[in-house]
Image: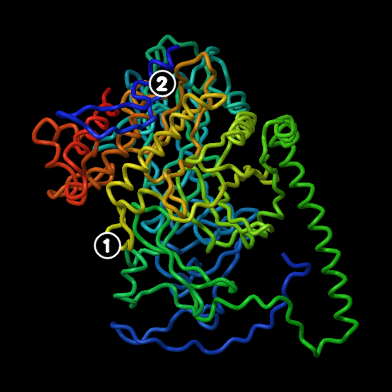
């Protein structure tokens, strides 16, 4: 069996020197009524700053500032008009009243905000881009930039129309732009119109791409096929698609943060421009670990705007002026009651629509038919998860990554769970998603995070996992002096064995083979006893028993990506093994997969490790703690094993 051959080091003993400690690593293979608030405003206090006396933003200082545009509302630090209405130029907005409805734009006048700003992100659209194609020119480039330094791209969905070219994303890897193919556009019928192409956008005259970007900007490259070159003798009635590449933003998400300090910790040293000015607030570092900046949130039990004085108010429910006549009160309550019932009916219809679209009935059948499942996966209602997360309170956010956001929740039975809200699932992928949920619900391994259930009443389904309290292996290995806990060498060996056993189970022992597709130290979580739990199957793929590989769009995390998979797009179990090899090197060298050398250059950890192995003894490469705690045989053993995992 081919898969058996690929399982090269199942329970392997690696002999190094005269003898070696046996290293067994199985690895290859909400309330009824809306609150009525009586708001009392007071004069804003004056704060001393190094440059003189300045007024902190407050309800009083912002009283004359515009806070809506058409159907959209926004609050400080965003603003329109005078400079005191917004925190800094990046947050200045424009309301274009020449259109119906009015459009809310950033100050550049081109990027439009299409939903009221959230506490951490904005949904936007960019202006269409047209690239005119020229005879004998094969390569065209385009880049998109966010509206200011305070913003990062999160994700984008683009429709690209034209004829006969390939679309690539240029990804920075080791200071070099590496092209990753996204889609191809063909025009078998030279007279295909743009309107027809856009109807399906399935590759004929138009292709649709979804990008998880997580960067300050992104670049696309278009390479025309030879048959797509313009010719002087081309038919005069040939479609205009042959002349222009058009890039249309279907939707895009940009993340915002405050950049006056690189982190919450540094704000404690210099609070001159500190943005979190309200009482009862807290600071949270930027979601992206590689980026600078912070955001402000109200404490638990408070709501409002932490960026203005006294903006975080205790959630007191309904406050009613006693001077109101009793009859007026009854009318008001009756009106709000019927409005509430009307809104509830609409919400129920919408949730049922999502449940049906997300194949809820199919999943119910799949789960109920699994007679062997002792602890069946549950289909949660949205009400249950909203209650568990305090309506998805931002303070419950555990992490934010390429595949979505994770919230901490407490269920009605007091179980603590992690609720994953994925960024996007295309409609044609829903059946595959449901199938994956059904398979993952059957996985039962002590070193794999248990899937407790899902919720299908939202546009994008939510996944519910057991909560793992001690964070990730990456967080402990690379937190430096900020962590009060460090892993011993024996702990590292045990965690490596546990993670390898989980991967072997996924590859060879589960009912259907699963390629994890994103093995990395941040996806190896540690429970209360620091036992390894492999997590995050957002990029995983199920593999039929008669197949040795699958072809996918290249996904993963730089520093962990198998070079052959990156080059060919063919994913197999050895792609997971390569990524696991990088984790082994992390455990030995205590360096991040992409790290900065003493000279300031960026270096790939696996390349560095393999190169250093050729130049000097392995014991001179490992971290000081490993050198002190591990025997020479152990250092050689694990070094040899890591090198075998990283072998092309």
Where residue 193 sits: x, y (%)? 58, 22
Residue 438 in which image quadrant: top right
For the residues labelled 1 and 2, the Cα–Cα distance comes to 40 Å
As rendered, which of 266 and 370 lies closer to the eye?
370
Residue, disc 1: 481
Q: Residue at x 52, y 54 (%)?
A: 122
Q: Residues within 10 Å of mark 2 (few under 14, many from 20)?
A: some
Instruction: Identify the mark nearer the N-term, 1 or 2.
Output: 1
Q: Which mark is residue 570?
A: 2
Q: Residue at x 87, y 81 (%)?
A: 328
Side of 588 relative to 70 (left or right): left
Side of 395 relative to 332 (left or right): left
Helix, strand or loop under label 1: helix
Q: Residues within 10 Å of mark 1 (few under 14, many from 20)?
A: few
Viewport quadrant of the C terminus: top left
Residue 630 in which image quadrant: top left
As rendered, which of 345 and 454 lies closer to the eye?
454
């Amino acid at each position: 069996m081919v898969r058996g051959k690929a399982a090269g080091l199942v329970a392997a003993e690696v002999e190094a020197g005269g003898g070696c400690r046996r290293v067994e690593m199985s690895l290859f293979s909400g309330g009824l009524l809306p609150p009525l608030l009586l708001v009392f405003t007071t004069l804003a206090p004056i704060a001393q700053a190094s440059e003189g006396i300045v007024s902190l933003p407050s309800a009083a200082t912002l009283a004359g500032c515009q806070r809506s545009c058409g159907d959209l509302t926004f609050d400080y630090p965003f603003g329109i008009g005078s400079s005191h209405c917004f925190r800094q130029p990046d947050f200045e907005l424009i309301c274009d009243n020449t259109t119906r409805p009015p459009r809310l734009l950033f100050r550049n006048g081109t990027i439009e905000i299409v939903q009221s700003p959230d506490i951490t992100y904005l949904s936007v659209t960019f202006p269409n881009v047209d690239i005119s194609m020229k005879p004998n020119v094969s390569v065209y480039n385009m880049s998109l930039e966010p509206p200011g330094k305070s913003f990062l791209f999160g994700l984008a969905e683009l429709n690209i129309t034209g004829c006969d070219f390939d679309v690539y994303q240029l990804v920075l890897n080791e200071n070099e732009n590496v092209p990753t193919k996204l889609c191809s556009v063909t025009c078998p019928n030279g007279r295909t119109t743009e309107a027809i192409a856009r109807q399906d956008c399935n590759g004929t005259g138009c292709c649709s791409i979804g990008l998880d970007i997580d960067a300050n900007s992104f670049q696309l490259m278009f390479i025309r096929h030879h048959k797509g070159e313009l010719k002087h003798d081309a038919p005069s009635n040939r479609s205009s698609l042959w002349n222009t590449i058009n890039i249309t933003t279907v939707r895009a998400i940009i993340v915002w943060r405050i950049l006056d300090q690189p982190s919450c910790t540094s704000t404690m040293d210099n609070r001159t421009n500190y943005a979190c000015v309200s009482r009862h607030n807290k600071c949270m570092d930027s979601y992206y670990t590689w980026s600078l900046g912070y955001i402000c949130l109200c404490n638990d039990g408070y709501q409002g705007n932490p960026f203005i004085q006294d903006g975080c108010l205790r959630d007191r429910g309904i406050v009613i002026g006693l001077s109101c006549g009793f009859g007026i009160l009854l009318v008001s309550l009756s009106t709000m009651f019927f409005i509430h019932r009307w809104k509830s009916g609409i919400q129920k219809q919408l949730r049922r629509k999502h449940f049906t679209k997300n194949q809820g009935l199919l999943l119910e059948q799949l789960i109920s038919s699994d007679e062997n499942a002792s602890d069946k996966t549950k289909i949660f209602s949205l009400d249950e998860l909203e209650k568990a997360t305090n309506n998805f309170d931002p303070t419950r956010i555990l992490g934010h990554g390429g595949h979505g956001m994770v919230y901490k929740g407490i269920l009605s039975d007091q179980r603590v769970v992690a609720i994953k809200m994925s960024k996007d699932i295309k409609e044609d992928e829903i059946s595959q998603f449901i199938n994956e949920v059904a398979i993952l619900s059957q996985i039962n391994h002590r070193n794999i995070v248990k899937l407790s259930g899902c919720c299908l009443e939202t546009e994008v389904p939510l996944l519910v996992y057991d909560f793992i309290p001690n964070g990730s292996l990456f967080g402990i290995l690379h937190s430096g002096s900020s962590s009060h806990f460090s892993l011993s060498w024996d702990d590292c060996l045990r965690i490596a064995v546990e993670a390898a056993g989980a991967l072997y189970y996924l590859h060879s022992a589960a009912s259907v083979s699963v390629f994890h597709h994103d093995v990395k130290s941040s996806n190896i979580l540690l429970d209360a006893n620091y036992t390894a739990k492999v997590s995050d199957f957002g990029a995983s793929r199920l593999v039929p028993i008669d197949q040795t590989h699958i072809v996918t769009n290249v996904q993963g995390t730089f520093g962990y990506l198998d070079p052959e998979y990156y080059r060919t797009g063919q994913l197999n179990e050895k792609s997971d093994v390569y990524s696991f090899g990088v984790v082994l090197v992390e455990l030995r060298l205590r360096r991040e997969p992409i790290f900065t050398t003493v000279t300031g250059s960026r270096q790939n950890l696996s390349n560095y490790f393999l190169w250093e192995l050729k130049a000097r003894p392995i014991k001179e490469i490992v971290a000081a703690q490993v050198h002190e705690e591990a025997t020479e045989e152990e250092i050689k053993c694990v070094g040899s094993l890591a090198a075998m995992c990283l072998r092309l």
